[in-house]
Image (cartoon, rainbow, N blue to C red):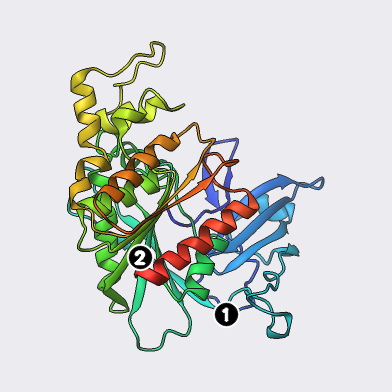
């Protein structure tokens, strides 16, 4: 699900036992949902593990060997290292203290809904980040569907979204739509052949559930995503223009029909639009006319005429996964509609746009874009 756990798997019978521990167990944390990962074994048979939360950076810790062999109860793990608070900067002079203090500034909670649409009935799980000092004022919301699409957003610390939440005073909603990892094989495979429909409706349902909490301003909802998340951001702007008012996207897939022969993952284009078993792994070929029509129908470009959202597009010009031509096609199409549109070009970046300067530039521009238009 939305929480990553460390488990013990028996070599004798294959049984799986979750390891229950919390490196911050002295902080009165009855509602905490930290995500944890196994790193390696120690010489004495123990384990090195990590733990983080949406509002708490990664901690490095150890578990004793006795706990791994008899993991029936909880245990107090030993903390080995903890990342310091974010450094000060020109935006937060040293006299004002650090930009971010672990465990403060914003909170988070997991939200689960059971959507009515789709054949596989599994909860859509989301993580809602809320700034601490919002008062009684309803918050603007930035919805963030993840990329992949077969991945997931866990309750781990991600500086960029902490920045938007704490310093931008935005609520942030991470949506693990069906097709995400961690919710069962049936849910994972249910997205194949339904990209652009089922995942779109899942994000809409999660967004409306967040609005129904009463803390979100329904007139100030934006969408932000990269790769498949950018694909969804463009889809949601076109399919639900009255709900999603502003968009920011990184290397978005816009037109599957024009991407399929230019990407290093043609299998994604076939499987996610046509279904499992529709891609010939040993025989590369261009799609047929009928397949091209289906790829177009499942693409955001098919809903271009409905888009009203001011849109920020960021492109890594060395991207081989989603060619930059995809984002350029969308950018020029939006400009032709006279919509407020901005293009960020990162010549030395590939699909991730994760070079230090580029990543910082994108998120600062994203915050400024939402500040201006949302």
Q: In this orientation, which residue lies closer to the viewer: 306 or 163? A: 306
Q: Residue at x 43, y 41 (%)?
A: 148
Q: Residue at x 26, y 38 (%)?
A: 299
Q: Give the image location of residue 162, x and y in percent.
A: 53, 67
Q: Crowdedness of circle 2 by 10 Å Cα count: few (<14), some, many (20+)? A: some
* Residue 253 in view of the camera: no
Q: Residue at x 33, y 20 (%)?
A: 279
Q: In this orientation, which residue lies closer to the viewer: 98 or 31? A: 98
Q: Give the image location of residue 228, x and y in percent.
A: 39, 43
Q: Secondary structure at mark 2?
A: strand
Q: Residue furthest bottom?
A: 136
Compared with 233, 109 (above or below) is below
The residue where tag 1 is placed is: 28
Q: Residue at x 67, y 54 (%)?
A: 49
Compared with 105, 53 (above or below) is above
First in sequence: mark 2 vs mark 1: 1
Horizontal side of residue 234 vs 84, given as left or right: left
Q: In this orientation, which residue lies closer to the viewer: 318 or 281? A: 318
The residue where tag 2 is placed is: 111
Say which quarter of the image contains residue 265: top left
């Amino acid at each position: 699900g939305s929480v990553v756990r460390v488990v013990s798997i028996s070599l004798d019978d294959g049984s799986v036992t979750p390891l229950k521990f919390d490196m911050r167990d002295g902080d009165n944390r009855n509602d905490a949902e930290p995500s944890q990962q196994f790193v390696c074994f120690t010489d004495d048979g123990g384990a090195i593990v990590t733990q983080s939360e949406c509002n708490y950076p990664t901690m490095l810790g150890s578990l004793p060997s006795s706990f791994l062999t008899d993991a029936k109860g909880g245990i107090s793990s030993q903390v080995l290292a903890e990342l310091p608070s974010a450094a000060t900067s020109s935006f937060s002079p040293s006299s004002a203290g650090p930009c971010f203090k672990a465990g403060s500034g914003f909170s988070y909670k997991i939200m689960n809904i059971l959507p009515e649409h789709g054949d596989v009935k599994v909860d859509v799980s989301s993580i809602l980040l809320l700034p601490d000092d919002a008062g009684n004022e309803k918050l603007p919301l930035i919805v963030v569907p993840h990329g992949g699409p077969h991945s997931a957003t866990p309750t781990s610390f991600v500086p960029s979204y902490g920045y938007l939440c704490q310093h931008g005073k935005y609520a942030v909603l991470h949506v693990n739509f069906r097709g995400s990892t961690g919710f069962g094989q049936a849910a994972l495979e249910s997205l194949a052949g339904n990209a652009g429909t089922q995942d779109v409706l899942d994000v809409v349902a999660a967004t409306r559930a967040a609005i129904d909490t009463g803390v979100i301003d329904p007139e100030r909802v934006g969408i932000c995503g990269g790769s498949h998340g950018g694909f969804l951001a463009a889809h949601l702007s076109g399919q639900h223009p009255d709900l999603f008012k502003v968009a920011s996207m990184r290397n978005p897939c816009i037109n599957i029909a024009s991407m399929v022969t230019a990407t290093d993952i043609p299998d994604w284009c076939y499987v996610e639009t046509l279904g499992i078993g529709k891609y010939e792994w040993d025989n590369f070929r261009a799609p047929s006319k009928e397949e091209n029509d289906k790829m177009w129908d499942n693409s955001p470009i098919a809903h271009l005429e409905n888009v009203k959202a001011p849109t920020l597009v960021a492109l890594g010009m060395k991207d081989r996964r989603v060619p930059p031509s995809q984002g350029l096609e969308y950018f020029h199409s939006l400009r032709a509609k006279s919509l407020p549109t901005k293009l960020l070009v990162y010549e030395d970046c590939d699909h991730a746009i994760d070079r230090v300067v580029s990543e910082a530039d994108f998120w600062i521009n994203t915050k400024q874009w939402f500040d201006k238009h949302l």
